[in-house]
Amino acid sequence: MPYLIHIAILFFIYAILGVGLNLIVGYAGLLSVTHAAFYGIGAYATAVALAHYGLGFFASVILGIVITAIVSLLAGMVLSKFKDDYYALASFGFNVIAFSIFLNWESVTKGPLGIPGIDRPSLFGFTFSANETFLALAVVLFGAVYALAHFIANSSFGRVLKAIREDEKALEVFGYKVAYFKLAIFVIGAAMASIAGSLFASYITYIDPSSFSLNESIFILAIVIMGGLGSLRGTLAGALFLILLPEILRFVGLPTDIAAQMRQIIYGAILVLLMLYRPKGFIGEYEVK
């Protein structure tokens, strides 16, 4: 049971990340490969606030959202100068910059040593120390994020985002300030990633830069593409699949000396086959181009 609770907590953390990124990639059509940077900002904001300043968890979540919103606003303004593949490459570069800051700003992040001793959340004297209670907190925060994302997706704002994805230039003809819509959803998605980062830091009670590398951004993007671009329910399916698949492969009877390598090969082969035969993902509206 503790193992299943652990998997469930990770699922909700990655579901939050996937939902936020799907608003950016799936709805607005912005191929961003920098979500782990905002995930890391939220995690480090909570880690520093809890470990060094004694700030409460929920206050640290708000702090992380504010810092992430400012950083993502500035990053988004720069990224708005690029289109299509160049946008993806520029976001790639931003993630590399963020990772380098996490790694080298030792006075704040402790560099490669990371930050240990991060407290679990507490509210009105109650501490979410048990994984069961932490899971309940993760469910509540996920529910809030999902409800906001669902509202955005089904609002007039969400319809404009889909129109931007389909034909940005046509929308500009009707007088829409497309750049403002793209910047707004980029900041909103980044803020959601910050919440996931706060949860992750407080759950693991230790963070270091390796958790927020470019590989992590690619993994989050894979969740969105696998689940289905433009589908929030698809994101949940993608997160569940990509969280469970490596765990299932642990129980496959492979020779011990090559087990780890074979699991990676099987994992990669399954992803390739799914992309070949399910290019829209599990519940997607359109294919990535």
Image (cartoon, rainbow, N blue to C red):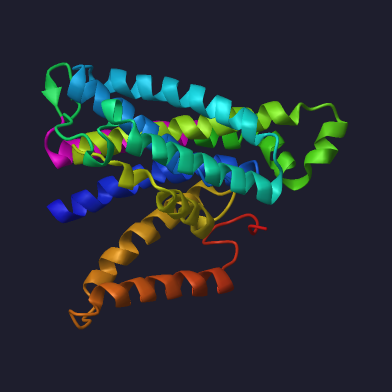
* Residue 115 can be seen in this image: yes
Q: Nearer the viewer, residue 89 or 39?
A: 89
Q: Is residue 141 visible?
A: no
The correct choice, above or below, for 234 with respect to 135 in the image is: below
Q: State whether residue 251 is above or below residue 282.
A: below
Q: Position of residue 136 (x, y in %)?
A: 24, 37
- What's drawn in magenta, residue-wise? 128-148
Q: Could you tell me which residue is drawn at 76 percent across and 26 percent down?
A: 177
Out of 55 and 136, give the one closest to the viewer.
55
Which residue occupies the extreme right position in the image? 173
Coordinates of residue 233 in the picture (x, y in percent) = 49, 49
Compared to 70, does 281 lie above or below?
below
Image quadrant in which the C terminus is located? bottom right
What percent of the width, then of the height, locates residue 167?
79, 44
Is 175 left or right of 193, judged from the image as shown? right
Q: Main secondary structure of the magenta part?
A: helix
Could you tell whether 84 is left or right of 195 in the image?
right
Judge whether residue 38 is colored magenta.
no
Q: Position of residue 240 (x, y in %)?
A: 37, 56
Q: Is residue 224 left or right of residue 197?
A: right
**Residue 146 among those drawn in magenta:** yes
Hey, which residue is sitting farthest bottom in the picture? 255
Q: Which residue is pictured at 83% across the width and 39% down the height?
A: 169
Q: Quadrant of residue 275?
A: bottom right
